Image: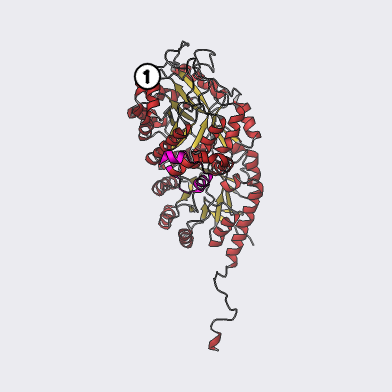
Amino acid sequence: MTDALLGNLDPEPVRAAMKARRKGPRELALLLSPGADPVLEELAREAHAATLRHFGRTVQMYAPLYVSNRCAGRCPYCGFRGDQRIGRVSLTLAEAVEEGRAISRLGLRHVLLVSGDAPNDVDPAYLAAAARALKNAGFDSVSVEVAPLDEAGYRALAEDGAVDGVTLYQETYDLARYAALHDAGPKADYGFRLGALDRAGAAGIRALTVGAVWGLSPWREEAFALGLHAQSLQRRWWRSRVQLGIPRLKNVPPGFEIPHPVGDRTLAHVVMALRLFVEEVGIVLSTREPPQLREALLPLGITQMSAGSRTRPGAYTIGDAGGEQFQVVDDRRPEEVAGSLRARGYDPVWKDWDRGFTDL
Amino acid sequence: MPDPLVVAGRAFDSRLLVGTGKFASTALMRAAIEASGAQIVTVALRRVDLANPADDMIGAIDRAKLLLLPNTSGARDAEEAVRLARLARGAGLEPWIKLEVTPDPRTLLPDAVETLRAAEILIADGFTVLPYMPADPILARRLEDAGAATLMPLGSLIGSGLGIRTRDAIEIIIDQARVPVVVDAGLGLPSHAAEAMEMGADAVLVNTALAIADDPVAMARAFKLAVEAGRLARLAGPGGQSREARASSPLTGFLR
């Protein structure tokens, strides 16, 4: 049934799906179908209205803090993959805090700790300690984007509210494609990755950010699976806030060709369809995308943006300490991004959490 | 004739309370507050930096003229709400708190059990507590018995703009309340606010309806007028509604 709906060519059922008060798999498939193409502007109006209702004219700002680019993974599409000849570094706790101070001097109060799959250097104890140290250094919210952990690992992060959020992208929901891209190492376990955010939810992590990497598999099927994954997380872990990330493959390592490139129009379509399917879910957009596109996508559903990002460990303080994970396209300083957002009638929000919620 | 809203012994001329979230800029928020005539302005503690006197949101609220009412938005349980309230008081804010315990980020509905628990703790601790609550008349009685300064039942989901979908329950709450009833959440249009006031609510609180209007300042003024009109109508004693024409002669005329 889903395949037929995803292939729908008629705009009328898409219009009906847009207006449906309760949206299920059927509506999601229709919103993603080619039938939406002629009515994309209508879709945009609905998506904009839903975004306004739930989030108003605000954008929450954050920056990534890369703590390690060591990686056991061999993902052929990633700049961190283990066989790339780049300078490898893992930050000590003290170095991570120094990076944090440099980020907070840029005005940011929410930070995302990022690492390759480096379990020897970056384990739950390290992450929890780094989160505590960063909160003591003035950050209001700390999230992590690291390889999947077991539930005990997530419990260690959630303890006392040290880590507020976990971001974990499935890369692709297509099992065969996933297996072909990740044929060795711990990442070969599709199920362990798919269940990670459930374990994080069970451990009491407050924000669960789910996503797929656009470009690996056909986008309609991917977006359909992503929407249902987000909804299932909402239903099971109803005390946690579910969010979506939409990283798109751009510059990939030599020798890898993006199998299903996703254009701007498609990315916008995905944002709108997912916004209407899970109205109250935040959508995060990184500096992989250029300024004009980031700001154009904002009214359609984006609610969080990174700014001033450096995607190499130590880069905020030390400079070129190691390889980058991805190329930052929007390299404006956070204050420039904020100024541009204000000019578009959006209030950049630097602080939307408080250490006071928990014991830290 | 003065007709103040009295909350915990304190009188306010305005019966419109406003929130500060979702505005396109702090300047616009300030202008909307001014136009609304509100004297009670609520601010999410998670959004402000209490340690920083230069915080733009706190700085935008003239505390000589307005009561800055901190709220615990984002709290998942009583403990978190209590902790936030105490932090706010510790940072020098008045011990007034708009209690919000909303564990489900999808609906942002208030948790009746945790709200009552937090209210009891905070009231015992000397706070003036204004709880955001489900439109449940028994919970309203329990909160009142616990010493809540107001009751703030929801009209519909926060930000939904759907108006008063809990009418029957709110009517019971108003009818039995000994403290002011403030209809909070879901009021999307000035007519919704007027409706609440006509029903006998003592005040209403709006935020999203102002923040996401094309012209928040004009919408704030429209809500101000609607609240005044609804209040006047309530005091005037509405004649009730009928689907049929009513003869102006008394129905007992035939007895003469």
Using a 10 Å C-alpha cutoff, classify the residue at mark 1 as few (fewer than 14 neighbours), some (14 to 19) or many (20 or more). Answer: some
Disc 1: which chain?
A
Q: Nearer the viewer, residue B100 or A310?
A: A310
* Label 1 element class: loop
As for residue A6 lying within the magenta part, the answer is yes
In terms of secondary structure, what is the magenta stretch mainly?
helix
In the image, what residue occupies the spot 44% across and 52% down? B134
Q: Nearer the viewer, residue A90 or A116?
A: A116
Q: Is residue A197 above or below residue A179?
A: below
On the image, numbered disc 1 is attached to which residue?
A119
Q: In the rendered view, does B153 fall on the left or right side of B222? A: left
Q: What amino acid is found at the position of numbered circle 1 in the picture?
A: Pro
Residue B16 position in % (x across, y down):
59, 52
Q: Nearer the viewer, residue B177 or B221?
A: B221
As for residue A260 lying within the magenta part, the answer is no
Residue A274 position in % (x across, y down):
49, 38
In the image, what residue occupies the spot 49% across and 52% down? B156
Q: Nearer the viewer, residue B69 or A228?
A: A228
Report whether residue B28 is seen: yes
Residue A56 position in % (x across, y down):
57, 41
Which quarter of the rendering shows the N terminus of chain B?
A: bottom right
In the image, what residue occupies the spot 58% across and 30% down? A294
Which quarter of the rendering shows the C terminus of chain B?
A: bottom right
Q: In the rendered view, does A144 fall on the left or right side of A50? A: left
Q: Is residue A316 above or below residue B47?
A: above
Picture colour scheme: secondary structure
The answer to which image quadrant residue B145 occupies is bottom left
Residue A342 position in % (x across, y down):
64, 34
The magenta span reads: A1-25
Q: In the rendered view, does B167 fall on the left or right side of B214? A: left
